[in-house]
Image (cartoon, coloured by chain):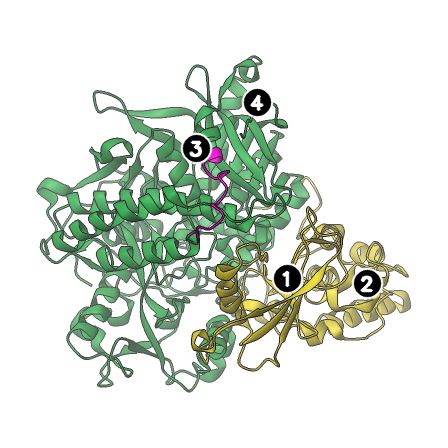
Chain colours: A green, B yellow
Amino acid sequence: MVSLKNVDTFHFDAIIIGAGGAGLRAALQLAKSDQRVAVISKVFPTRSHTVAAQGGINAALGNLTEDNWHWHMYDTIKGSDYLGDQDAIEFMCREASEIVRELEHFGVPFSRTEQGKIYQRPFGGQSRNFGEGQATRTCAAADRTGHAILQTLYQQNIQAGTTFFDEYFALDLVKDELGHIGGMAVMNIQTGQYQLLRAHAVMMATGGACQLFKTNTNAKINTGDGLAMILRAGLPLQDMEFWQFHPTGVADKGMLLSEAARGEGGVLRNGNGEAFMVNYAPHVKDLASRDVVSRAIAIEVKEGRGCGSNKDSVLLDLTHLDAEVIKKRLPGIREIGLTFMGLDLCTDLIPVYPTAHYMMGGIPTNFNGQVVTLDESGQQLAVPGLYAVGECACVSVHGANRLGGNSLLDIVVFGRAAASEIERILKLQKSSSFFDKTLDLSAVEARLNKWEARPDVDAQPESTAQIKRDLQQVMQEGCGVFRNQESMSALIDQLDPIQKRIEQAVLQDHSQAFNLERLEAFELENLMTLAYATVHSAIERQESRGAHSRVDFPERDDRHWLRHSLYFQENHQLRYKPVCLTPLTVPGVEPKARVY
Amino acid sequence: MQFSIYRYNPEVDAEPYLQDYALDDGLVGQDMMLLEALEKLREQDPSLTFRSSCKEGVCGSDGMNVNGENKLSCITRVSGLKQPIKIRPLPGLPVIRDLVIDMALFYEHYHAVDPFLKPVVQGVSIDLDHELLQTPEEREKLDGSYECILCGCCSTSCPSFWWNPDKFHGPAALLAAQRFVVDSRDITTRDRLAELDDPFKTFRCRNIQNCTASCPKGLNPSQAINELKSLMLKKQID
């Protein structure tokens, strides 16, 4: 029997779960303000999935064309299909220029203009003067911007002396006898030991969960661990029906080919060689918002205009661009084409298809990063000591559809803001008796004990890998680019048997050191939790908005559905809260039909 | 398809051994990467242990020694490999389990070169209304070093690093050092060079060039180290 009563326990002012861009930006802020901060990560920090972000980070620097944050804010609200909270969006867009320059001062090797300023490129959904011409707003380090930002933030944390728990897996939040968040139960992956980390503030920065879908651009580690912990703690997840399918994943395989490919001038062609985006977005064509482009591709394929032997993809064409531009501005994705397809972007067309890429939903927070829930009467309530930032959080700045270049911005803006809030609160009050309280460890112990069971001698236990594959398959079929009542009802019926298989699964490997099978079992439990959250949130929302495209309800319905979903695990209950339509200092943007 | 894989579980094995595995040829596609093959083998034997994450050669988790060469499994096609495919952990560092090595020493050397930009005197803040200017030509000097993913393929292929892993920084850390030495925004070039000018830290490099041969990102740490050495020489002549 696993008991956590006498395990090693560490005490901090703040602990951050996840070492991607959001977690590292927050950690840097706290370390610099002399708080005792620790970062827990299941991989070495520079292997976090921020590393794979390619195209860039949005800020209205105006280095190439005139720009200002008002236009950025307008585009973000329109891109969100009006589900984004306008106070948070204003906050993010106003902070953008300063925070990008700060990253540059930290050492990010941005590409440069002839004047020596940060290079910017056009991206989808960006406009000048509230929807008029194309803007050039995405700051880039070639097509390795995420890699450059992640490494730089890690380097800054080395300098600041942040404590890292590398290759530690966060198991669950633990509460004290009063029901307050008291810390985190973790597992040292290298030794298999369980430990407790107690802290005044716990921050979730665990990233996304697109491993829920069969074809995705995400790393194997993107299993939504922090999101599932929140549900198990009795707190809700917001807008879980909104998953972004990136238009240009490598067909069948899923690797991301950045929107920068189209930003630099690439076009999509169907099986007849036709540049079809003009039929869907006559003004901006290939640089429409991602939900629009992904739907267009899915429709082209569905209507028989796909390419390849199964006519199940379309082609990304950059062959008309100067090869030198491709080599200089898009070296990373050219490498992906060469490595995985044996195709060269300079001379070959690349088969692509929409691929699960990003979750707009997540842990509900205000724009100080505090996790919020609803009280009995439906009022929003901040949860003391608990924070969330980055892809796992839902502030919500992305609403129903995120614009390219806004996720790297989101992670650094809210990473810094949440850390500042923690710093402010810790300075006001740091109760010395906080760590005297007893922690309630029974729930997490029960979960750990479930996986201690040994297999029967003659039984052939089912592999967790097989269960995960089946989960990914049914999620893709039931809750993909297009959904309807039928596909999602069928999906709900398919999830229960999969849940049962997880409950019955038994580990074959019970070693302590680097036990991958145990780790993957924990991750699979987390994904399963999120599968339910997704399908129940999605089946209730009877409209189409942003990335949530229902064939049976093709129109957006602001009268009934201009509101955020909040999913609670208990009885799959759904509650709702209003969208904030009033920015902080400027007039709001009224919802209207969305045309690109 | 036949595999011979290094196995070691510290809880049960007195010493490491090689275990044979086979994968049904029907499961092996023309464009299958080694990581996919290893994942299929894990379904036969869930105790087989290796690191991996991004599946596309950018996170640097899955360095391993394949038929004698250090590679990332996720961007190495199995079709071109001689069978049985012999897979061992990256050489020269302690093994935690199977293909998972303890990279603590590798990371210590990275930390030791102050791998962070120092654009101003400590304690002075910079005006956030402006970026630090850098011409495209100055920025180009960072190409070939900032792309490093810290996978460790280079340092663990280097005989000098095998011999002095505690004292010689190794190619990955020196590549990082060079990245900050040549960054036009950094004002501590002289201090950095002085710190690196050491018979062990830098000058254990004997131009063997295994580092450059093994870099899965096509970078050239050997050239970067030589650039550091010649910059040190220039400073002495100045």
Q: Which mark is residue B162?
A: 2
The correct choice, above or below, for B237 with respect to A195 in the image is below
Mark 3 or mark 4, whichever is nearer to me: 4
Q: Both on one chain, marks 1 and 4?
A: no
Residue at position x 50%, y 78% in the image: A327
**Nearer to us in this view, A382 or A595:** A382
Question: Judging from the image, what secondary structure is the residue with disc 1 in?
Answer: loop
Residue type (three-letter) at the residue carrying disc 4 = Lys
Q: Is A67 or B153 nearer to us in this picture?
A: B153
Distance Cα–Cα, label 3 vs label 4 = 26 Å
Q: Look at the numbered disc 4 and give the secondary structure of its residue.
A: loop
> Which mark lies nearer to you, 1 or 4?
4
Quick one: quadrant of the C terminus of chain A? bottom left
Of residues A159 and A376, the one nearer the viewer is: A376
Question: Which residue carries the number 3 mark?
Answer: A387
Q: Position of residue A176 (x, y in %)?
A: 47, 19
What residue span does the magenta drawing correspond to? A447-461
Name the subunit of mark 4: A
> Disc 1 to disc 3, how far (Cα)?
32 Å
Callout 2 secondary element: helix
Chain containing the residue with disc 1? B
Q: Amino acid at mark 2?
A: Trp
Q: Is residue B221 left or right of residue A28?
A: right
> Is residue A454 in the magenta section?
yes
Residue B151 — which label? 1
Q: Dot 3: within a 10 Å radius of its alpha carbon, few (fewer than 14), some, or many (20 or more) residues?
A: many
Residue A585 visible, this angle: no
- Residues at badges 2 and 3 in contact (C-beta under 8 Å)? no
Q: CA distance from mark 2 to mark 1?
A: 16 Å
